[in-house]
Image (tube, rainbow, N blue to C red):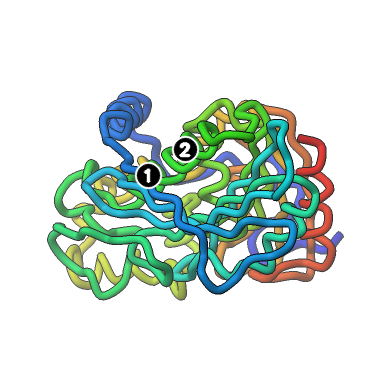
Amino acid sequence: MPSTFDMPLEKLLLYQGTNPNPGDFDAYWEKAAAEMLSVDPQIEIIPDEEFQTSYAVCSHLWFTGIGGARIHAKLIHPKLVEEKRPAVLMFHGYTGDCGGWLDKLAYVAAGYAVAALDCRGQGGLSEDVGGVSGNTHYGHIIRGLEDGAEKLLYRSNFLDTVQLAHIVMGLDRVDEARIGTIGGSQGGALALVCAALEPRIQRVAALHPFLCDYQRVWEMDLAKDAYAELTDFFRRVDPQHKRQDEFFTRLGYIDVQHHVSKISADVFFGATLADTICPPSTQFAAYNKITAEKSIEIYPDFGHEPPPGFAEQTFQFMMEL
């Protein structure tokens, strides 16, 4: 197998990440989880008026997340299924949305419930209540950073995934012990973090996860495209890099690699070695720290794109819930 532009594969398989892990990481997330649990979710489930099928009920799920934001997900239930069934939680890529109904129906046809989250402030219907200093034109990674670690937007996004998991686990005819998470890029990051913060999740499928090893991205001079805001922070806020250590340490709270050791679910991972958006070493920084049962599919010639067959392998993996 050829070497990547990043590291040879043998080094990728051993790489343990660069971005610092804050010393109070566990306490930070315990406090965050307690805040989430104190919120009344005010759940609403509203059937879609335009799209239904003979075998699925397609609905809009709304709930209140931390900060009072109303969060949206698409929820699809199989019809005529009385016994408790597994469920799959789907998470989308950066700046996108939860997508249409059609790409979720294969799971419903197999008897699974599906819930697909819209991330705050991105392309879907979920609310971003804002209230932070600094840049809000783009840049969700650094959103809220200047106001303290508790104001990081991805803290809210990570907690939204867990709150969605709790809601789905509590639905009639959903088996709370048979829940999986799926996603690519930002969605892969959220699928992993959701399972780390909610240990009842049993299966995770993640493709080239975003939000991993920020300092490594910056050191590789790849703080562009989806990671452009890292460079933007230094240019606008810290042009002499006097706060560089503080900056990357604070981002450590929302670095996926520092979450994954908490996962107890089985993990199916896809790594793309020609990926200049989420460099291979950042993907492996997360994969190598997973201590649960795991397997990986490696695609040497693919960048930040869906490799052929990965969706089908993910489906088969989830069918074992």
| Residue 235 in sight in this render | yes
Identify which residue is drawn at 48% across, 70% down.
96
The residue that disc 1 covers is 43
Q: Quadrant of residue 290?
A: top right
Q: Position of residue 68 (x, y in %)?
A: 22, 48
Q: Foreground: 124 or 84?
A: 84
Q: Position of residue 15 (x, y in %)?
A: 62, 43
Give the vertical position of 299 relative to 249 (above or below).
below
Give the vertical position of 222 relative to 294 (above or below).
below
Identify which residue is drawn at 31% across, 24% down.
27
Give the vertical position of 246 relative to 133 (above or below).
above
Q: Is residue 48 left or right of 249 when viewed as pictured?
A: right
Identify which residue is drawn at 34% across, 64% down.
230
Q: Are marks 1 and 2 in contact (CB under 8 Å)?
A: yes
Q: Is residue 270 left or right of 239 when viewed as pictured?
A: right
Work out which quarter of the rendered image holds the C terminus and state it.
top right
Q: Position of residue 76 (x, y in %)?
A: 61, 54
Identify which residue is drawn at 63% across, 34% down.
173
Work out which quarter of the rendered image holds the N terminus and state it.
bottom right
Give me the disc on residue 167.
2
Give the vertical position of 111 relative to 82 (above or below).
below
Q: Position of residue 237 (x, y in %)?
A: 17, 65
